[in-house]
Image: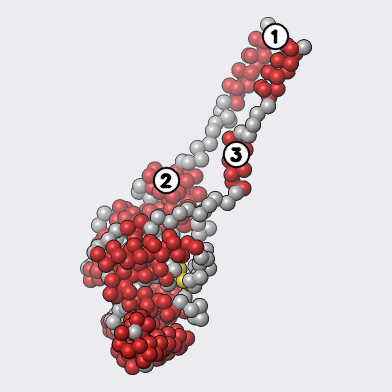
Amino acid sequence: MKNIIIILFLIISFYSEGQSKYELELLKSTLSSAPKKQTWSFVRSYSNEYDFMFSHLFLFYKNFISSQDANSCSFTPSCSIYAIQAIKKQGVVIGLINFFDRFTRCNSMSPENYLIDKHSHLLIDPVRNFNFEKQ
Amino acid sequence: MKFKYYLTAFALFVLINLRVGYSQDLYNLNNSLKYADYLYKSHEFNLAANEYERVLFIDSTNNLAAFRLVESYRKSALYSIAINRLEKYNVNINTMSHDWAKEYVRLLILNQNYALLNNYIQSENALASADKIFYSAISDAYTYNWDKAKSDIKNNSNPQNKSIQELKNILSQQDKLKYKSVPLAIALSAIVPGTGKIYSGFWKDGLFSLLVVGVSGLQAYRGFQKNGISSKYGWIYLTMGTGFYIGNIYGTGKAVNKRNSGLNHKIIHQIEDIFNRY
């Protein structure tokens, strides 16, 4: 009897198996992957002390304030990203002035003036310079 | 004994059919060319370019395949690669045939190589004088050099050229465009915040700016009136209001730029249509 049980156990152990790698991958594919954490690598290069200060203000805002709330900005890039991009691209003074303008435009009242991003369905408004030249 | 018989029969069968049983070389010159032409005619230019690359790898002297390769890259919007291939298959760009020269000029315009384009147009080449006038005017229009584009067209000695006439008509529309003045808009926004934006056509943004600057100013006024010059409340709102005020002036300039660019783009779209048909 003992031998029969051992043989049966061995036979079953040959044929029985847990989840195969293929099945695991299949199961994984049914779950939506968690969004990748933003690293903001472009923010972490500084040209001066003001840039350093605003970059860290931005990182603080993104990590502790913005992350606790849903996205409410009507633009892509969002106003906070726009501000830091403007500061990096145009310098602290013009960048901040540009941000104030953007902040007043962030009211969702004029979608007809912008293109719409297909993925996020937000209004596209990248950082642009004001050009005094006649068009 | 029986096995030997079957083996001999099989060997005979194979030998007899050896003449017929050959494999096809799907990737030979003829088949690749046929498939490349099929893709080209089906407007699958990206795929056609790959096939023409194979054809030219086998036979680099096929001029039509080289021309279609460059065209396919242009129609796939890969302008730099197209120019590279054109220069590869035409050692001397000044002695190229008329079709090749037109293709080269088109590519230079699409790739925004305007300096190179002007040099090429001014040099001796296979382009007709009407072509030179047309492409020169197109490149000037694309860089918003409207006056030069109009003067280029004036030099046209062939009034029968339909495309040049069309281009002339479109350029004459540019005179009628009502551009907004940047200094005027900025001055308006400096006097009454938001009015510059209203003037440039973005009236909702203008009204909102007026509201934001107005409310910030009012709050600052209330703070100072209540606690005097040492009011923190007043200073915070004054700083914010100043930011919004200056931001609005800057934004007004951008708004005028945007509106004027929009007007220019309407003309440019019509010019692109003629350029693509020429």
Q: Are marks 3 and 1 in contact (CB under 8 Å)?
A: no
* Mark 3 and mark 2: Cα distance apart in space: 42 Å
The amino acid type, in three-letter code, at marker 2 is Arg
Instruction: For the residues labelled 3 and 2, say whether their Cβ atoms are less than 8 Å apart.
Output: no
Picture residue at 65% right of the left edge, 9% below the top? B4
For the C terminus of chain B, the quadrant is: bottom left
Q: Are marks 3 and 1 on the same chain?
A: no
Q: Give how far across and how far down residue B179 sits, in percent.
A: 36, 88
Q: Which residue is mark 2?
A: B54
Upstream in sequence: badge 2 or badge 1:
1
Subunit bearing disc 3: A
Measured from the top left, where is residue A41 in percent x and y?
A: 36, 56
Q: Tag 3, which secondary structure?
A: helix
- Specify the quadrant that holds the N terminus of chain B: top right
Count of numbered badges drawn on the protein: 3
Of A19 and B94, which appears nearest the observer?
Answer: A19
According to the image, label 1 marks what residue?
A: B2
Q: Label 3: how many residues lie within 10 Å, few (<14), some (14-19) or many (20+)?
A: few
Are the two marked residues, 2 and 1, in contact with CB atoms closer than 8 angstroms? no
Front-most of A68 and B212? A68
User: Most extreme residue toward the right, as rendered?
Assistant: A1
Q: CA distance from mark 3 to mark 1?
A: 55 Å
Which chain contains the residue that carries disc 1? B
Q: Residue at x 44, y 61 (%)?
A: A64
Badge 1 amino acid = Lys
Q: Which mark is residue B206?
A: none
In this rendered view, identify the residue nearer to me: B143 or B252. Answer: B252
Q: Quadrant of residue B213?
A: bottom left
Mark number, residue A24: 3
Mark 1 residue crowding within 10 angstroms, few (<14) / some (14–19) / many (20+): few
Specify the farthest residue to the front: B227
Q: Secondary structure at mark 2?
A: helix
